[in-house]
Amino acid sequence: MVKVKELTDQEYLYGHKACPGCGLGTIGRLALKILGPRTIVALPASCMSTVTTQYPQMNYSVPSLTMAFAGTGAVLTGMSAGLKAQGITDVHVLGLAGDGGTADIGLQALSGAVERGDDFIYICYDNEAYMNTGVQRSSLTPIGAHTTNSPAGTASFGEKKPKKNLFEIMIAHRIPYAATASSAYPYDFMNKVEKAKGIAGPKFIHIMCPCPTGWGFASDLTVEIRKLAVETGMWYLAEYENGKVKMNLVPKKMKPVEEYLRPQRRFRHLTAENIKLIEEHRDREWRLIREKWLVKL
Amino acid sequence: MSNKARSSQLDFLNGDEAVAYGAKLCRPHVVAVYPITPQTIVVERIAEFVANNLMTCEYIHVESEHSAMCAAMGASLVGARAFTATSSQGLAYMHEMLHYVSGSRFPIVMMNANRTLAAPWNIFGDQRDSLAQRDTGWIQVYVENGQEALDMIIQAYAVAEDDRVYTPVMVNLDGFVNTHTFELVAIPEQKDVDEFLPPFKSKNAIDFNHPRSFCMTAATEWNMEFRYQQQEAMNQAKEVIAEVDRRFGDKFGRYYGGLVEEVRCQDAEVVLIGMGSVAGTSRVVVDKLRDKGWKVGLLKLRFYRPFPIEYFKGLSPKVKAVGIIDRDISFGYEGALASDIKAALTSASAPPKVINFIAGIAGRDITKENIEEMYNKLFNLTQGKEEKELQFIGLRW
């Protein structure tokens, strides 16, 4: 277990240019504190690469590589293989990619790398749209969200499709370790990185990363919004290990989804009927979770 | 090319196998390849070498060509020597990554089996796949036979990894004509290759004592400066290619001439220019016509990038007509080689007349008769007869 007093003072990601209130900096910062100085970071085209690797102001004090959008999984494979071939065994290879770079254009390369069993940690920070290009929907955008290419209008309530389940896609690969996380729960996240650090083969962490700019909420509400996502059941914290899923936090009583949706501009067009639809969708997902993963044997 | 007797084993190999042996001798740490006809034998032979402990490397079963180049780049980033191979659609699929690798100056070597691009779909050879990658910042060399294929894989690493260059190299073999044709190929001794090509100590790799960001964002204020450096490296590569060729020749007894090879060009009045396997066929025709007293020559263009403009600037004023064989066409204009060579010839002291021959598309044979026909047309030009500037050779109608 991670102990906050034992966390290093050393910053490996410092001085980035992310928007105020963005959770992305915290995710990179905390992950690197756990993984330490002998880590190489690979970043595809994304918010993360844009705000941390603008020549000549480089924000990592570990080696980093900015990558093509589609290739994060494959470049992690190459780094891992290159290190292995040279007998270097004490280096962590870390991918930090967004939702579009992971679940859309990068899914093939990620699937290939996980299937091959290469040794790396992949963190998908999920801000639920292509934020770097100005808020376009990805396959991880939730149903009902307004984005610039799934806009709400007289004939549309925004994004029509529910969020793709990346965690379960990873489970289908029988990956050694997969987890979901939220940086509103930093201990949970750091412990998951710590656990991933000690496991051989591919490791995947899917972390919720609210975006004040794209979602439309005040920059001081980031942590609150993240918490509400979990408390309303719109996001869950779980781990997959040794073939089993463990739910880390199950809200005793779900808060109404409205509490999560209302503070966000991207959902402000939703009618009571739309919200009911979203709530039904959430309940259906949780029924499945209970059936699959919360059955007491 | 001269053939001094050296200690090496002669084997009956096809071009793909020659490439596989070449790669093996270079001891890459990482091989990331995805199969595609007609490159596949390279993938298979290297897999067999590894499976039988004849070669030690991390052999990655990537799920696409895009990922093959990503993996090669990741390996190069951590200081590993990386090899990959592809062809045609696969090369097109990894197009984006070619820019990433050259722009971030990773000295990766790739074999490409030249094959036409769909549609219409076809697995046979022409050079449109690699010529379409002209501006990706890769050094491109085209080989004539299996021996040159093997030798150029070794030379490619020596060029790519030179401090003055740090630019990736693509070694092109004509699909089937080179890749699947068996010839006697001399396989150099490992110890000689080890002496020629020392272990890779990358200056463009991670260092935990001095962490750097690679392949980063360079905005408008700096981006042009990175491009300028790439251009400078390409210019430097011309010298390095010549040096490496001489050093290779001294060690293994085979010299290739560097950027170009002239075949009986002295006092030639007409010269044909071609890349890859067509040079082999043309040599025979040149000898035959020379026997008849015709003043013909052949210029084998070996490197497409960096482009040997100096050669064309200095072209002998005795050359009255030049034929450029393109196994490709840039639709709406002419062959890719023709555009470059014609532009370069404007600087010659006495620019010759030029015909661009489009030939050998999608595996169509370029026969000795075709070559002879080309020389005839060039002589027509020297005698003041009209010839079209762009001609398809061997067209059905």
Image: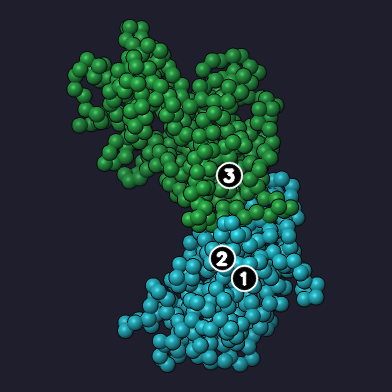
Chain colours: A cyan, B green
| Of the pair B32 and A264, the residue shown nearer to us | A264
Dots 1, 2 in contact, CB < 8 A: yes
Q: Secondary structure at mark 1?
A: helix
Q: Residue at x 48, y 81 (%)?
A: A216
User: Is residue B291 positioned above or below A171 on the image?
Assistant: above
Give percent across and percent down for residue B205. Answer: 65, 47
Give percent across and percent down for residue B238. Answer: 51, 30
Q: Is residue A155 left or right of residue B387?
A: right
Mark toward the start of the polypeptide (1 vs 2): 1
Q: Residue at x 49, y 79 (%)?
A: A215
Total label count? 3
Q: Chain of mark 2?
A: A
| Of the pair B109 and B389, the residue shown nearer to us | B389
Give percent across and percent down for residue A244. Answer: 67, 73
Residue that mark 1 sits on: A25
Q: Is residue A257 left or right of residue B51?
A: left
Residue that mark 3 sits on: B106
Instruction: Give, as a three-letter code, the residue at label 3.
Output: Phe
Instruction: Give, as a three-letter code, the residue at label 2.
Output: Val
Q: Chain of mark 1?
A: A
Q: Secondary structure at mark 2?
A: helix
| Of the pair A219 and A6, the residue shown nearer to us | A219
| Dot 2 alpha-carbon crowd within 10 angstroms: few under 14, some 14 to 19, many 20 or more | many
| Of the pair A211 and A96, the residue shown nearer to us | A211
Residue that mark 2 sits on: A51
Q: Chain of mark 3?
A: B
Q: Secondary structure at mark 3?
A: loop
| Dot 1 alpha-carbon crowd within 10 angstroms: few under 14, some 14 to 19, many 20 or more | many
